[in-house]
Image (cartoon, grey):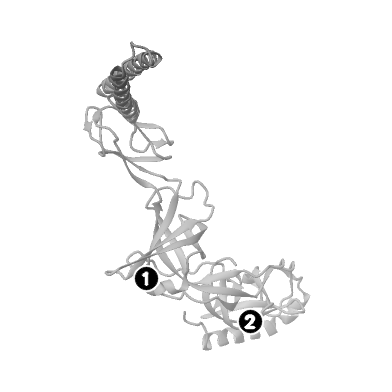
């Protein structure tokens, strides 16, 4: 930033000094002028550059059909806000219900077959017991006993097969029941419907997208940052961003390790820190992020309200120990929100007039309330005229920061 200095302010000081000598006697008898003062203070500054980003949703995409069926009703409309579990599209369930009924019948048949074989095994075991009781008598036949044992073993094998078919029928019934339930295509999460691809009467197959949703409550900020500007930022660091006319704090979550060969930028993701519900009005909304590009440094600052242009110079009225004002030419640096960086002319702790300085004259006595004590804070300053190299960047804009 160019400094404001040289001969114009010297002329201004001479004019003020001469007029001050002529008016000194009058000023000594005049009552003290009420003014508001502020202290010149030393603050920590961080050089920043403004980059244009955008609001992105962490969850968005198409909701797909899980079964094949015609569309019965399309309940979701574009722009609808839905809760997790709300029905978006209802498919026709006539054939699905028939498939479930058929699965139920197959289950009953498999269960009956299994029970029949179990009863057959019970009868064979009873006959085997009677043959065992005939051992030692003339009616006992070893061949008949062995045959019965073989019959029981064969029946047990058929029972195992019937048991497997029964379990398969149970699973098939649950599968068909799931198909019926999946005919109601529901919202997987809370969000907003941004696109609907089907209407009543359309036929959808498994995997066909039917509705697109975005989770407007789970957002991040993405910005394309020039690669050479990434050295000053690290994941986990905090910085300021502007959404609309409001300023919020954001935490850098990740720097994507892929560089655009055309713009030489990399995508950087930020997480807003406790933003209000109404901070974001739309996905894709523009956001300005102030990225630090240099190490913090200490600088002397003065309130912008204290600076008065005078004959090409910039002046401030400094309050002396005798509570009289004296004009002081200053050389200013970069703007720091509501303050200027002071290159020369003032020292830390000087009191300068911020209100009522329009009518003051050199040597005039003033009355004021001492400024409230302020704790140090960190301000940010953007280099004059610097812009990012990506299409998504905007001219550097110095803003006040926080410690």
Residue 135, compared with residue 343, is above or below; it is above
| Between 8 and 95, the one nearer to me in the picture | 95
Check if mark 2's residue and mark 1's residue have beta carbons within 8 Å: no
Please indicate whether residue 225 sits to the left or right of residue 150 in the image: right
Q: Earlier in the sequence, mark 2 or mark 1?
A: 1
Residue 163, compared with residue 397, is above or below; it is above
How many neighbours does mark 2 have within 10 angstroms: few (below 14), some (14-19), or many (20 or more)? many
The percent position of residue 250, horizontal first and vertical second, equals 50, 59
Please indicate whether residue 215 sits to the left or right of residue 240 in the image: left
Marker disc for residue 346: 2
| Between 20 and 116, the one nearer to me in the picture | 116
- Helix, strand or loop under label 1: strand
Marker disc for residue 333: none
Q: Residue at x 51, y 80 (%)?
A: 312
Q: Residue at x 45, y 46 (%)?
A: 217
Residue 45 position by quadrant? bottom right
Q: How many marks?
A: 2
- Helix, strand or loop under label 2: loop
Q: Nearer the observer, disc 2 or disc 1?
A: 1
Residues at marks 2 and 1, CA–CA distance in whole angstroms:
37 Å
From the image, tell me which residue sits under label 1.
226
| Between 80 and 158, the one nearer to me in the picture | 158
The percent position of residue 13, horizontal first and vertical second, equals 60, 85
């Amino acid at each position: 930033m160019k400094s404001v200095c040289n001969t114009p302010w010297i002329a201004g000081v001479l004019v003020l000094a001469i007029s001050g000598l002529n008016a000194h006697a009058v000023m000594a008898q005049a009552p003290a002028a009420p003014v508001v003062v502020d202290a010149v203070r030393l603050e920590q500054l961080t050089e920043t550059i403004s980059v244009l980003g955008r609001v992105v949703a962490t969850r968005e995409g198409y909701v797909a059909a899980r079964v094949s069926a015609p569309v019965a009703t399309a309940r979701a409309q574009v722009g609808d806000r839905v809760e997790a579990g709300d029905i978006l599209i209802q498919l026709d369930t006539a054939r699905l219900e028939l498939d479930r009924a058929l699965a139920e019948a197959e289950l009953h048949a498999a269960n009956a077959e299994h029970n029949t074989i179990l009863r057959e095994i019970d009868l064979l075991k009873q006959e085997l017991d009677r043959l065992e009781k005939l051992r030692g008598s003339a009616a006992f036949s070893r061949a008949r006993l062995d045959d019965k044992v073989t019959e029981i073993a064969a029946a047990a094998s058929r029972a195992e097969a019937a048991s497997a078919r029964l379990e398969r029928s149970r699973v098939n019934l649950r599968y068909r029941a799931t198909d019926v339930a999946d005919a109601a295509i529901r919202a997987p999460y809370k969000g907003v419907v941004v696109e609907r691809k089907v209407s009543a009467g359309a036929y959808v197959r498994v995997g066909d997208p039917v509705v697109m949703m975005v989770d407007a409550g789970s957002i991040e900020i993405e910005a394309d940052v020039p690669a050479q500007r990434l050295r000053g930022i690290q994941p986990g660091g905090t910085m300021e961003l502007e959404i609309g006319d409001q300023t919020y704090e954001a935490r850098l979550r990740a720097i994507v390790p892929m560089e655009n060969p055309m713009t030489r930028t990399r995508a950087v993701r930020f997480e807003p820190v406790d933003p209000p519900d109404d901070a974001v009005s739309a996905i894709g909304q523009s956001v300005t992020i102030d990225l630090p590009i240099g190490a913090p440094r200490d600088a002397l600052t003065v309130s912008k309200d204290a600076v008065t242009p005078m004959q090409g110079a910039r002046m401030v009225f400094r309050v002396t120990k005798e509570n009289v004002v004296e004009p002081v030419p200053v050389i200013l640096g970069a703007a720091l929100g509501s303050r200027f960086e002071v290159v020369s002319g003032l020292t830390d702790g000087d009191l300068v007039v911020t209100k009522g300085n329009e009518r003051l004259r050199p040597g005039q006595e003033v009355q004021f309330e001492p400024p409230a004590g302020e704790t140090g804070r960190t301000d940010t300053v953007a280099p004059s005229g610097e812009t990012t190299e990506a299409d998504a960047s905007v001219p550097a804009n110095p803003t006040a920061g926080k410690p």
